[in-house]
Image (cartoon, rainbow, N blue to C red):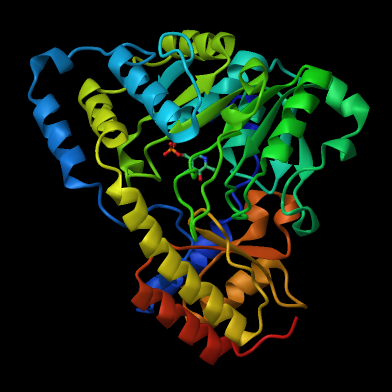
Amino acid sequence: MKIIEAQRIKNLPPYLFARIERMIAQKRAEGVDIISLGIGDPDMPTPDYIIEELSREAKNPANHQYPSSVGMINFRQAVADWYGRRFGVELDPKTEVVSLIGSKEGIGHISWCYLDPGDTVLVPDPSYPVYAGGAILAGAVPYYVPLTAERGFLPDFADIPSDVAKKAKMMFLNYPNNPTGAVATEEFFREAVAFAREYRILICHDAPYTEVAFDGYKPISFLQTPGAKEVGIEFHSVSKTYNMTGWRIGWASGHPDVVEALGRLKSNLDSGQFQAIQYAAIAALSGPQDIVAYNNGVYRERRDILVDGLNEIGWKLEKPKATIYVWAPVPPGHTSESFAELVLEKAGVVVTPGTGYGPKGAGYFRMSLTLSTGRLKEAIERIKKQVGTVKF
Ligand SMILES: *Cc1c(COP(=O)(O)O)cnc(C)c1O
């Protein structure tokens, strides 16, 4: 019997990396030593004091039962305290913070709270694929807002047609940005609040990289913007800050109605995250923060190797101020796919074609800084030797 899929899952965009993944598998089978710059997942371990807190709390039978879908009050308090210390943002832990099973879970589910079939949602292009994916699963229609190099990969609100803005119910934003490495300014966030107010649009700001930044730059939170809490929420997590992507714990904070709606949806779908993991996240947010400076030192050294190396071969890249990514244009005469296939075929190096993040990613590729300096140097050497210098 053929099992017929629901239309909503058929509507998901096709998986773009299938061809590259087949090539990688074939190369590996041939014994080629592949260097993958494709994975956006911190390679350094979670600090010991966080793991110890998990072990301690895992032994407490009180933590073995169902947790609350919205998170323990002490977890939500730790998030509120961290926002206060880090951003000077005041949050009521009872009504303005909800725990998530990783921020991706909430980003995927928020569309179910605010988008009905046929509704318009503004999605940056390029962007993290979960924004469009979650919206499409809810039956909504993404309107792609281009992010261009000329505008520092910040959307131009004035360029969104007013009939589209009038229809739109929600907009996703993400700074520091994956995949472009771009950062937002206070002025940009003020424009976002004004735009949201004018057209009654809920802003969902995704902020997992606020702690991953270099050269003295300190990213801001959307919630620092006057009026932000009245028009939006911010997603965040311990994943990128404390090397905890596998632990699956994050949160959304901001507008109390939105926090409540997300909590109500979740209470129908999941039962929250294991309390021992919530305790570990409290330890991460409340404990010593040396790990943040340490990680950033490591990523900065890697960023410099990658960017300086590519610039020696002919690129003219600026160093990103934040995130674990370098976003670069492909050499003239190439598409994202043809260039990714060329460096894989010739140099055994995997980069992500920009088109995986939306149509406007065409002409770009993304590299991540989650490999050792030795491997990054080797990747540069191989590209230099096998692909040669390029001219822009
Ligand atoms: C890594 C990442 C996330 C997801 O983080 P989790 O909290 O681990 O789910 C969300 N958004 C962007 C842009 C990311 O790069």
User: Measuring 47% from the left and 9% from the top, which residue is drawn there?
Assistant: 95
Residue 143 seen by the camera: yes
Left or right: 79 in relation to 178 = left
Left or right: 76 in relation to 89 = left
Left or right: 275 in relation to 210 = left
Left or right: 199 in relation to 341 = right
The answer to whether 89 is drawn above or below residue 211 in the figure is above
The answer to whether 60 is drawn above or below residue 54 in the figure is above
Q: Position of residue 90 (x, y in %)?
A: 49, 20
Residue 11 seen by the camera: no
The answer to whether 128 is drawn above or below residue 380 in the figure is above
User: Could you say which quadrant of the image residue 97 lies in?
Assistant: top left
User: Measuring 54% from the left and 66% from the top, which residue is drawn there?
Assistant: 351
Q: Nearer the viewer, residue 25 or 223?
A: 223
Q: Position of residue 154 (x, y in %)?
A: 73, 46
Q: Position of residue 235 (x, y in %)?
A: 51, 30
Q: Position of residue 45 (x, y in %)?
A: 25, 52
Q: Quadrant of the C terminus?
A: bottom right
Please give the count of numbered marks on the rendered protein.
Answer: 0
Q: Nearer the viewer, residue 156 or 116?
A: 156
